[in-house]
């Protein structure tokens, strides 16, 4: 037998054994020797040998919903399901039409009003009590919906033939991309209210959403600009030849193709926004990571099992990011199948 054929098999066996040797202690700690019940004494006895997933069972409400009133937690649960349904609808290629944006905005507004309350017999819950997964999804989706049209205008402005408009858009994009998001959040939370009269100050949650949207728009603008550059120039000439003006050409010819070309990068940017929402914990908004610190920081008995809590939060982030990436692949393959073949 040729030794060149057997060598890859030996390498496969070697790497398989090495992976098993490295992963077995993790599997033993996370599964075999783990404590799955909210038994504090059993968790303490298994420390260093097995994971204590009982901390998730004990603190799951605080981890998922934050400080939202216990008896009213059906409201953030319903709001979360509403947002997930909107994200699910966005994965259908046939629904990628202009009317999808008003539907998403309506669902976001309904989820926000449901959590806020103060009408139809619902008790009012201030935003400082919001937290966990619903707050993460609200901020992520709200920031994306606000950032997307602004990013389109920035991308078009940066490609404009007007020098002043092109310079302003370029300056904004480069300036925002050169500043960390955490510094902008600090300014929105603490500095911006000092510049306005007391009667004009708005709640911290809208300030945070607009800040993240303004930050994300700079990155999305560059992604959209790359898609605009991929559109063949001949299609613009053809559109002008049949009498279409600039805005008609942009809306019906250029943008649909540019967004298709930039779809993977756009989904990647949304994943980045979803993960960057964890930074809002520094301004006293307890999203997923902030809710974890809130649930374990005030409980001395369960505080030592923070590793299991962080792994649980990481699993939630990974699950949503994985589903978004799969949805992006599904949309991309659908667009490729619907694209006519060139002859």
Image (cartoon, rainbow, N blue to C red):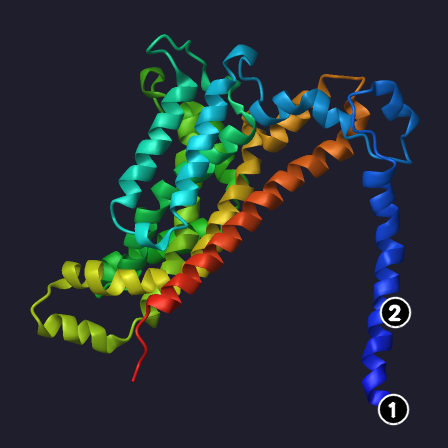
- Tag count: 2
Q: Quadrant of residue 300?
A: top right
Q: Residue at x 20, y 61 (%)?
A: 252
Q: Residues within 10 Å of mark 1 (few under 14, many from 20)?
A: few
Q: Residues within 10 Å of mark 2 (few under 14, many from 20)?
A: few
Q: Is residue 245 above or below residue 153?
A: below
Mark drawn on residue 14: 2
In this rendering, position of residue 217 left or right of residue 244: right
C-alpha span from label 1 to label 2: 20 Å
Residue 29: give x, y in percent of width and height. 86, 40
Q: Is residue 23 above or below residue 6?
A: above
Where disc 2 sits, the SS reads helix
Q: Give whichever of 59, 284 is nearer the camera.
A: 59
Q: Residue at x 69, y 22 (%)?
A: 59
Can you see residue 193?
A: yes
Q: Quadrant of residue 182?
A: top right
Dot in front, 1 or 2 = 1
Residue 142: give x, y in percent of width and height. 40, 37
Residue, far bottom:
2
Q: Residue at x 37, y 51 (%)?
A: 172
Residue 106: give x, y in percent of width and height. 31, 32
Q: Quadrant of residue 188?
A: top left
Position of the C terminus by quadrant: bottom left
Can you see residue 202?
A: no
Q: Which residue is mark 1?
A: 1
Where disc 1 sits, the SS reads loop
Q: Is residue 53 above or below residue 102?
A: above
């Amino acid at each position: 037998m040729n030794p060149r054929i057997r060598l890859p098999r030996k390498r496969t066996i070697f790497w398989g054994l090495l992976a098993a040797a490295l992963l077995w202690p993790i599997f033993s700690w996370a599964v075999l020797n783990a404590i799955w019940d909210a038994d504090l004494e059993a968790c303490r006895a298994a420390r260093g040998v097995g994971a204590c997933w009982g901390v998730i069972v004990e603190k799951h409400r605080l981890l998922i919903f934050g400080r939202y009133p216990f008896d009213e937690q059906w409201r953030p649960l319903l709001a979360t399901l509403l947002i997930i349904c909107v994200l699910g609808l966005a994965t259908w290629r046939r629904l990628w039409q202009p009317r999808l944006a008003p539907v998403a905005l309506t669902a976001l507004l309904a989820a926000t009003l449901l959590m806020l309350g103060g009408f139809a017999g619902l008790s009012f819950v201030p935003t400082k009590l919001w937290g966990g997964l619903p707050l993460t999804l609200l901020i992520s989706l709200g920031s994306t919906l606000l950032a997307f049209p602004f990013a389109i205008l920035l991308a078009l402005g940066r490609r404009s033939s007007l020098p002043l408009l092109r310079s302003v858009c370029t300056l904004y994009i480069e300036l925002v991309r050169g500043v960390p998001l955490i510094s902008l959040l600090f300014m929105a939370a603490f500095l911006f209210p000092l510049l306005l009269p007391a009667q004009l100050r708005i709640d911290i949650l809208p300030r945070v959403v607009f800040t993240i949207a303004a930050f994300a728009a700079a990155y999305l603008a560059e992604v959209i600009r790359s898609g605009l550059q991929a559109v063949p120039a001949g299609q613009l000439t053809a559109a002008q030849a049949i009498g279409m003006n600039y805005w008609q050409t942009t809306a019906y010819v250029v943008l649909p193709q540019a967004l298709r070309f930039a779809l993977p990068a756009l989904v990647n940017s949304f994943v980045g926004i979803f993960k960057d929402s964890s930074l809002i914990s520094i301004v006293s908004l307890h999203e997923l990571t902030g809710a974890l610190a809130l649930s374990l920081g005030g409980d001395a008995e369960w505080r030592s099992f923070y590793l299991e809590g962080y792994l649980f939060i990481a699993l939630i982030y990974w699950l949503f990011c994985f589903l978004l990436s799969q949805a992006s692949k599904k949309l991309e393959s659908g667009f490729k199948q619907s694209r006519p073949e060139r002859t």
